[in-house]
Amino acid sequence: MWDLLLLDCRAATMDSQGTIHDAAIGIAGGRLTYVGLRTGLPHGDIATTVRRLEGAWVLPGFIDCHTHLVYAGDRSREHEMRAKGMSYEDIARAGGGIMSTVHATRAASEESLIESAAQRARQMAQEGVTTIEIKSGYGLDLENELKMLRVAERVGEIAHMRIARTFLGAHTIPPGYADNRKAYVDLICEKMIPAVAREKLADAVDAFCESIAFTPGEVDRIFAAARAHGLRVKLHADQLSDMGGGALAARHKALSADHLEHLNEEGVAAMARAGTVAVLLPCAFQHLRDTHKPPIEALRRAGVPIAISTDCNPGTSPVTSPLILKDVACEVFGLTPDEALAGMTRNAALALGLEAETGTLTVGKAADLAVWDVSDPLELHHAPRGSGLLNRYFRGRSDKHGDKP
Ligand code: NIG
Ligand code: FE
């Protein structure tokens, strides 16, 4: 007995079943209860609703596993600064960068942040996204960090998707603490992380380990506090320079280490051993006109799972399109289309610790799926923005028909 049965479709399960032509997908209670050949359907089972998809492709809903989706303000003038040759560090030191978004986000009301972030989430949903990770990190004080995390939760309710929330109080040292960095790290470890854990406002803690942000020693303290409060960790690692970030993340059993342009060999090996996912952010790489690519071949050889994400943020990647992400990952980083797809589904789930819940079309997982009008998933690569998506199901409920689980 199913609530919903999808027939006449092809499925790219992204799990060990691979691709199924002439597939059937059964959904009950918002979860996948059958994924297989239509001819293998058990006899006699009845479905409340049957939908024939006329040969369309069904894929897992996309997962955008690294975003800074909640923010206020506008940093488009940074394009001009970059065109004049200023680096990310130059822009940050000149008062732009993360701190300019912090000022705007602190001044913004919760309602206005919800509205603008939900708009971005809807754009992602229109291209098949069912899960978004959202980081705080533009508040940098207790009140505004908690505000961002509350906003993130509301975005999921409005845009009809799952939100994984990550506390990123360690995004940069806020003004007032430049001469007393320790006091800010104390605030993170002793006040912010306990509050986030107590109020269950995030699943993970992230930090930006870089010369313009936090040192490996400071990250060690922050991650120890996170783990003492039962929170998983992830790291903005080795983006602008080799800080030993990959090995640092692995040492803390991080879910993921992200960016990784300057990841060293030891970091690759440590991540492979720890099962830490490499989250690549090719759109940020492109916006920063970076030329130093992550060691992708070494990651492949070591068997480190690779995920990709938009890194949606107002400064270095104002991108809300998973299809553009997929294209840039292939054309700029040289991932294969299959690697890119795995990076937006199965491995992105792993990067969030959500692999039991979503990321593949596997019986038992949530029925998070996207139905595409393409003759092959490889075509998604070239689908013009906003086209191609026929329907999206989140926990078994569709955008188009409102089928309830
Ligand atoms: O992931 N690298 C640090 N943080 C963000 C950028 C945030 C910003 O510039 O506002 C990133 O690229
Ligand atoms: Fe980021």
Image: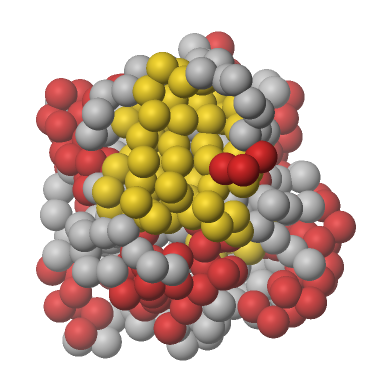
Please tell me in which quadrant of the rendered image residue 305 appears.
bottom right
In this rendering, the answer to whether 312 lies above or below 27 is below
> Residue 292 versus residue 174: which sits nearer the camera?
292
| Quadrant showing the C terminus | top left
User: Can you give x and y, in whole percent of width and height, for residue 319 in the image?
Assistant: 28, 60
Q: Residue at x 55, y 57 (%)?
A: 21
Q: Taking 353 as reference, is 80 above or below it?
A: below
Is 291 in front, or is 164? 164
Q: Is residue 290 visible?
A: yes
Q: Position of residue 350 (x, y in %)?
A: 65, 46
Specify the quadrant of the image occupied by residue 366: top right
Name the spot of residue 375 as percent of width and height, x first: 38, 68
> Number of marks in the image?
0
Say which residue appears at 31% left-offset and 75% top-offset. Answer: 382
Residue 149 vs 301, above or below: the answer is above
Is residue 312 depicted above or below 141 in this figure? Answer: below
Q: What is the quadrant of the N terminus in the image? A: top right
Please say which color scheme the image uses.
secondary structure
